[in-house]
Image (cartoon, rainbow, N blue to C red):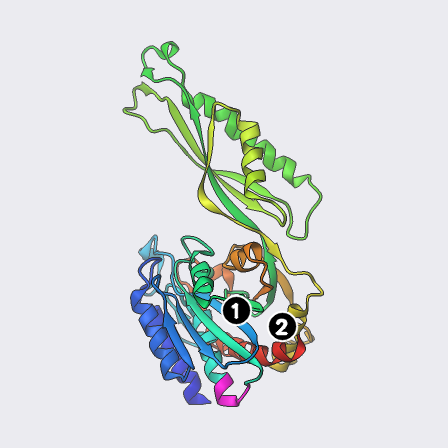
Amino acid sequence: MKKFENDCLKFLLKMVSTPSLSKQEKAVSKLVAKEMKHLGYDSVKTDKLGSVVGRIGNGKKKILYDAHIDTVGVADIKRWKTNPFKAVYKNGVVYGRGSCDDKGCVASMVYSGALIKKLGLLGNFTLYVSASAQEEVAEGYGIDYVLKNLGFRPDCVIIGEPSNLKIVRGHKGRAELKVTAVGKACHASVPEEGENAIYNAIPLVKNIDLLNKKYTRLKQSELGNPVISVTQIGAENASTNTIPDNCSFYIDRRTVEGETAKKVENEIKKICGKRAKTEYIKKFFKAWILPKNHSLLKSAVLSYKKAGLANKSWRAGSKNPEVVLWPFCTNGSFTMGEKHIPSIGFGPGEEKYAHTSNEQIRFKDILKSIKFYSAFPLTFSEKS
Ligand SMILES: [Zn+2]
């Protein structure tokens, strides 16, 4: 097993040292395809966005694993203790951009396919491991394309994103909108001849805050309450001595299950009035939640136990895995939110390290997640 573990570590280090900002995944996608072929995947395909899908087995139950290969950029390199694009392995921890979000999960999923073959954990299932592109710019975009190319609906999906080895059964959705208040431009020396769009925007911004306060008083759904915030504001103006005729502010809206794009837009339009223009600047990402008694969840819990992750040695007194909700949005918004394919989340790594400087992941957690990912397909195919 030592060689297997070392190979997996080497693969992860290579991926982290290969920058792959969204829409620039080509090099890393080649690396993943090469590794899958080397590990004996039954087929490996790369689509035009750069997502790689490897197949193991040929059975009835179709299982899709998905983790994304793109990463966010680096805002302030001075905050990093190591070069973010040169992986460092020290005291059991891998450092570098993408180590936690989401290349650790990619390595785990890719290697679980290899372990399934190695240990003969094959059954009446086909496992597809997707290392998908462009998740960071638009959750669902890369995976949508992957599903279209597969040409069928999988029986279930596991989203590999950092969950600190907890099982995840849903998360809020999100939307980004822009509201533009209008006015009439004129010289700032005679403001009464125009209409200041900034002054028109301010009460609307306050209304958004009031709407958020209203949400906090709503009866809580399992995912919590809807949340709405203004995150940026500005006027496009010819000069600083002109009264602006436009003022736009940006809204981040977190949704709960059942909320639609239209509902979200209408609520904002209602409080911003007809004179302001409300528009989506990012697609609407749906919230989703898998029912507590869903058979997929049962299979996941059983796989977790089979993988030995519920042993005392791992966490004293904890026999069952923790089942939680993710605070952030993932490709699950598409697979379960849009397409209603039963999905769960599971992955190594702590979400607090995602998108931050000194991003990191414990390698032993990757090994644990490989056990889970390799125990799952057989369990799922036998149970459901
Ligand atoms: Zn991610």
Q: Is residue 308 left or right of residue 78?
A: right
In percent of the image, x 40 and y 19: which residue is there? 183
Left or right, 146 with reference to 189 = right
Depth check: give the residue in front, 204 or 131.
131
Among all residues in the image, which is located at the extreme left? 239
Where is residue 362? Give x, y as percent: 47, 73
Is residue 74 depicted above or below 205 in this figure? below
The magenta stretch spans residue 229: no
Q: Which of 213 and 295 is in front in this view?
A: 295
Residue 12 occupies quadrant = bottom left
- Magenta residues span 116-121
Residue 142: image location, x then y, percent: 42, 59
Q: Nearer the viewer, residue 66 or 93?
A: 66
Residue 300 numbered tag: 2
Number of marks in picture:
2
Task: Find out whether the residues at labels 1 and 2 contact each other: C-beta distance under 8 Å.
Answer: no
Res. 347 mark: 1
